[in-house]
Each structure stands twice: as structure tokens, then as C-alpha cells.
Amino acid sequence: MSRLNRREFLKSTTTAAMAASFGSTFSINVLGANEKIVFGVMGIHGRGNYLAHRFLAREDVELKYFAEPDTRLFPERVKEIEAKGFKAPECVQDFRRMLEDKDVDAIVMGTPDHWHAPGTIFACQAGKHVYVEKPCHHNLHDGRQMIEAAKRYNRVVQIGHQNRSAPYIYQAIDYIRSGRLGDVHLVRVMNSKARGTIGKEPDGPVPEGVDYKMWLGPCKDRPFNNNHFHYAWHWFWEYSGGDIINDGVHQMDIARWVSGVTTPKSVYSTGGVHFFNDDQETPDTHVAVWDFDKLTMVFEQELWSPYMKKVPMPIRDGDNLPTWPFIGTRIEISGTKNFMYLGRHGGGWEVYDVDGKPIAKGKSGFSRMERDHIADFIDCIRTGKRPNCPVEEAHLSALLCQYANASYRLGRKLFIDPQTLGFLNDDEANALTKRPYREPFGVPEVV
């Protein structure tokens, strides 16, 4: 097959044209056991840069590209790579440059949420495997198309729920499913910690070196604003869904996984912006309730409490367990016999009996699970096996958060259609399961 002409590729103006170009042009590399996996990173402001260093800790990978709309980040990021003795990656403002490079095997995606689905789909179409950060996607339609793209192009897509590679979580699941907790009818998920304000920012000129149209991608066009850029995007519906989907999705994925449930029958969510007085749209105080068959799951969030905190890093990688009542990222599992605290990211687990006495516990480190999650992705590329966190699983967990956000935004209880995974008899709610896309970066109807 001939290689796609770069000029023709960059002139593509529709998603369909991009899909057709990728599908007809790129061949699949077959990697030998000793051949290095070449990767590029899409989005290097925060998480993508962190992941680049975590991947480079392995000897069987090679970093070839940094792709980032904000070119001001390149000098410092490249300097950090070179300081560790690695070759400087090629820096491109348009991610499509690395997708057309036949030497690239995989894309590591640390972009904002609104880019997760388009970036993953375009990468699959280009014959690349994908490691994409959580949450899996921005909405139901995005998730469906990610699943289809991974399947159609036979690509490994690993979602960054590192807890799926944590041995202590598997131990906790074994304990629960052994029946030693009894029957579980209530799971409570906490996502609370103090977070600073994003303030109020006026629109202004696009900074020199920033391709803001590229950063917006599939989102509607708007003037540049610092609060609609880099980290503050988390608190706007257009790009994400607040802290339930930013951070709480980790706990929600664990809670759904250990409970053995998939799709709820209904969801009700309430809360508000009670503490902050800034530009954010998403709630700083949030409660959601999902009903499954014989199981109720509750989510509680407060982003203003100084006493609720994440598990400290020394405890995550050490042997001690945290002080559970003040861990803001815990899961509480109520059984008819015993009760379990379960922490994410190395937090461990502990079981208490009917008299409040600890009777069992488990622990394994955060650094290990992060390393193992990346190792699993690399191994899947070489062997073709299913990753620890495939897109199908992460899709269901992200939907729990998006169901809650839909209920919050509409102010009413919503009922889930088990066939479509959308909402039953509710056009207004179903309108939130898909977004209008700005081309050429929209999620295609046919991948």
C-alpha cells in the first residue's frame, strides 16, 4: 500500500474523509519479541507528560513524538526527556503528523476528556494501539464508537484505570465473592477533598504558540479563555463533567467492578455549586444514587472539606493502612455479615466484623500498579491478549458518572434503557448522550 500524502491528509475537512484515508492507507506492524515499541504522546500539559516518563522507564519502548497544541510547552518537556538520557522526541502541534508515521506503533493519550474518543478512533484507524487516560469518553455515543473502532481495527485500547492492575483489588474481589461479607446491598463511594478556585477569567487573545482550534477539537468554537484551557477545563460540561468524572470515576470503576454490576435501572443526582464563586459549571457538592437489582450505589462529593484527603503517598506504597473515616477517596461496602473499606491507588482494604473489630486486610503499592498497568498494555500489543482495562469495561464505568451528571443537569430521576444504555422515554436526557461535533474532529457515525 502506498503511504498517504501528508498534504492531502492535512487538507481533509470531514471526519468521514479522515476515516477513509486511515482505513485504506495504514498497514499493521507485526512486532517481534525483542523489537521496541515506538510511541507518541498526544497532550503533554499534565498527565501525558507524566506517562511519557513512566513508559520510558521500560527498556522495550521508544518515544518518537510529542503532540501538543500549546507549543510553549515543548522546550521544557524535551529538556526533561534529554536530562534522563533519552533522545529528544519530534514535537508537532498537529497530532495527525504522528498518526501518518508508519513507524509509530502506539499512542499514549493525556488529552482533555473531549479528545479521548476522537483521538482514540483516529489512532485505531491509523493502525495504532492506544493507551488513553480516564475517563474513557465524554458521552455514550463517543464510547460506543471507541469500542467499535478498537474491534474493527483489531487494536489494543487500554484505559488508564490503573486499579485494574492492582493485586490488592483482586484480593478484595475474591474476599467479597467468597461470601465472607455476606450479601452486598449498599456500596458507598466517596470523592471528597479540598480544591482551589479557578476564579473568573475574561475572554482574550489566543497566546502566541497556541493552536486553540486544535485544542477545542470536536467542541464548539469559542474565544480563547484561560478557564477553558489546560486544567480548568475539568469544570465545564463542554469538555468534561466535573470531579465525579475527573477523579471520582476511579472509585466508581472499582465500585462497579467489585459489585459485579453493569448498568443501573435508574439514577438520581443532586447538589450544586455551594462553596465556590467562580466560573465553574459543575457541582462542588454532589450526591448521586444508582439502583441496580438488589443493590444501591451512592456517590458523595465535597470539594471544599480540608479534613477529607486522598491517601498519602507514603501509605500508598507502604505497608500501613489509612485512617479510613477521613480518606476522601474510599469505597464502603456493606454486607449482611461484615463491612469493608476499600481504597484506590494503593490504599488497600480492611474488613470489620459486627463488633467493629478488624478481621482481614490487604495491601499492594501504587507504584507497582501503575508500572503493571503499562506493562499489561505493552504485553497485549505483543501477544494480542485482552488488556486489564479494555474500553468496554471503562465505557460502563464512565457512563455511571455521565448518568449522574445528566440527572443533576435536568433535576430529575432518570431511567436507563438496558438495551441502548441511553434513557427510557426521555428525549431531553438522550440529547445529552451525544454532542454536536465541530469538523474535522468529530466522532464518526461509521468508524
Image: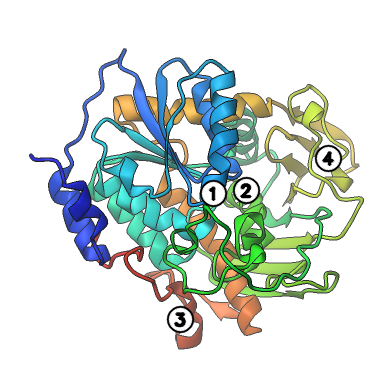
Relative to 310, 11 lies left or right: left
- Nearer the observer, 103 or 298: 103
Callout 4: few (<14), some (14-19), or many (20+) C-alpha neighbours within 10 Å?
Answer: some
- Identify residue for label 1: 134
CB-based contact (under 8 Å), mark 2 and mark 4: no
- Identify residue for label 3: 431
- Label 4 is placed on what type of residue? Asp
Of labels 2 and 3, earlier in sequence is 2
Q: Nearer the viewer, mark 2 or mark 4?
A: 2
Q: CA distance from mark 1 to mark 4?
A: 34 Å
Per the rendering, the mark at residue 37 is none
- Identify residue for label 4: 353
Of labels 3 and 1, earlier in sequence is 1
Q: CA distance from mark 4 to mark 3?
A: 46 Å
- Nearer the observer, 63 or 306: 63
- Nearer the observer, 124 or 200: 200
Of labels 2 and 4, earlier in sequence is 2
Residue 227 on image: x %, y %: 66, 65
Q: Residue at x 48, y 50 (%)?
A: 394
- Label 3 is placed on what type of residue? Ala
- Identify residue for label 2: 250
Q: CA distance from mark 2 to mark 3?
A: 26 Å
Relative to 233, 442 lies left or right: left
Q: What is the basis of the colouring in this image?
A: rainbow
Q: Nearer the viewer, mark 1 or mark 4?
A: 1
Give the image quarter of residue 245: bottom right
* Secondary-structure class at tag 2: helix
